[in-house]
Image (cartoon, coloured by chain):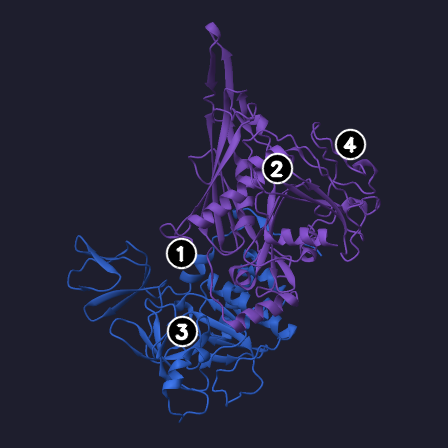
Amino acid sequence: MAMAVDMRLPTFRSDSRSVSLFDRKGSKDLVVPGDVITTDTGFMRGHGTYLDDDNLTASVAGEVERVDKLICVKPLKTRFNGEVGDVVVGRITEVQQKRWKVETNSRLDSVLLLSSVNLPGGELRRRCAEDELTMRSYLQEGDLISAEVQSVYADGALLLHTRSLKYGKLGQGVLVQISPSLIKRQKTHFHHLPCGASIILGNNGFVWLYPTPGQQDEEAGGFFTSLEPISLSDREVISRLRNCLLALSAHKVLLYDTSVLYCYEVSLSQQVKDILKPEVMEEIVMMTQQKLVEHEG
Amino acid sequence: MATVQLSEAEKVYVLHGIRDDLRVDGRSCEDYRHMEIETDVVSNTDGSAKVTLGHTAVLVGIKAEMGKPRPAQPAEGYMEFFVDCSANATPEFEGRGGEELGMELTNTLYRVFNNKRSVDLASLCISPGEHCWLLYVDVLLLQCDGNLYDGISIAIKAALFNTKIPKVLITEGEDGVTEIELSDDPYDCVRLSVDNVPCIVTLCKVGPRHVVDATLQEKACSVASLIMAVTPAGTCTCMRKVGGGSLDPESIFEMTEVRGHDPGAPPFPVCPSFFLLPPPVPLSSSSPSSSSSSPSSFFLLPPPLALPFLLLLLFLSPSSSSSSSSFLLSFSSSSSSLLPPPPLALSSLLFLSPSSSSSSLLSPLPLLPLSFLLLFLSPSSSSSSLLPPPPLPLSFLLLLSRCVDI
């Protein structure tokens, strides 16, 4: 057995990261902190801006948004600001009275009420006091769930629900955490990729990769997780997808099913563990971007 | 220690992956993540380096200052270590949160470098008993993503390589006063030899197998890991077990057989040459089978490791491999370098050698796959009364008890 160690000096690191972000989106107003947005005093100061001697200046790096007289800067690197209907992947941090606290990469922990989950036994099951006492048997600290944002509290905390069979506790798989602004909003965030694995692209930047399930067991209501070993081929696909996701996010490419799949296909010429090497990463991402441009115009 | 939470199913996924030799990031069990080393990054130090290993980032700065040598080693300089766990790495380190981990890392570093072989401390001496260089090695953890020990040791080695110590001129003034003159020319400096500076390899036991360079997720699935500091020559300068769990002796042997990548390099750990005991130690007189007559070239005690009072030496020679792959495991329990060498009266020196079963006290161990040569140095009666026997890690006690039981 050989131990592979790859060491290098930082000179190998090229500085092309920022280029891919800016040259394709020249039409959008992107600013960095300190950039003067306008010198016109007729505008109102919104989030991400400040007044510096009558100049409206950006305080964060991001995209300028104008609503009538109000100017805001929507930051590129931020925590998750949830909206109703967003699909999220989160981790249970606390079990409380009638509710779970869920970490979803937002500023405050999200809330999942016992009344907004599907318990085993079907949708019409009544909740009793016993359910309240056995909450930990359904979801305990550390468990991962997929859920949808039901509403947003005044302080920005999210109220989640899992009242659909597609949501619920997640089983075996890999969680990849990336910036929420890199997830493209789409009709569906659940995809069964043709390469053999499935993906949940949570709007909060948590991406869940798991082997495509054979058939759904509806009786368990989504709380049963199989601990059977996963085949090596499935594992390899998942690991490759994981590294592709990290490569795409390192080069700030928007993530959606097509971009992930193209990146996967491009990366097939490389070994899974080599994808994360900077030069390989750059090459793969460049080829992915090229493919995206070719196929989508 | 920075930790992550994992669900049961995630842990099972990681465990099965390691069992199948395909980790979550596509590496096999004995692959490192890719690593970047940057030297000369802090301008106001004499030597500095930054190592990034995955998302682990470690910054090391070395400052040379002039000081007085320690009374026990008048002709040597010395090194001081300090590990700072910045709250930038993880919010857990805020306030005093990182202190415990910092102390643990610092103590390990002291043990790794507490011998004459890793760094040529004599070259740090300016005038014996009067002046020497002391190197302050300051480690700053910038990000934690597992495998801190390996990252820190590599960063220290890089920083030592980068260290420039100004040349010193000693002039004997009138009335016998020595004057020390520092060279003003920044290029007029001495470089340290880092040929023998050890690197730490952490082997993390996950399920039935072990992995190198464990990420935080993998660490969360493991019960214990073995830390080994090895020099390029193959000397093991420090070996520790960390983590709450215990390690089976067999899995320790398995872990120590991890080999380097270069096929031309000798297998690790290897002993290319004999390390002889310091003269006062009457080894051959009290041992039933002297080292020279033993079949394979065994390690003998390197002098610095002979200092601790209680040494448990296990000479292991894998029965399958050739004589060149016999190696030394040394567990030095008390690393008090300030104390003078103890008399080392090897009153009860037991040898158990695979070839000479002449030892009456212990019989060869047929159950273990590896043949044992157990050398147990007990402290002399005077020194044992001064210091209680230091606690050995549980697993090593287990190992010891198992050997004695049979």
Residue A56 drawn at (x, y percent): 21, 58
In terms of secondary structure, where does tag 4 sit?
helix
Whole-angstrom CA distance, mark 3 to mark 1, is 27 Å
Q: Are marks 2 and 4 on the same chain?
A: yes
Left or right, B63 with reference to B123: left
Question: Which circle marks residue B309 in the picture?
Answer: 2
Amino acid type of the residue that numbered disc 1 sits on in the rendered structure: Glu
Q: Are marks 1 and 4 on the same chain?
A: yes
Whole-angstrom CA distance, mark 3 to mark 2, is 60 Å
Q: Are marks 2 and 4 in contact (CB under 8 Å)?
A: no
Residue at position x 74%, y 33% in the image? B283
Q: Is residue A189 visible?
A: no
Residue at position x 72%, y 52% in the image? B403
Of B404 and B277, nearer the camera is B404
Whole-angstrom CA distance, mark 1 to mark 2, is 37 Å
Q: Which residue is mark 3?
A: A203
Q: Which residue is mark 4?
A: B285
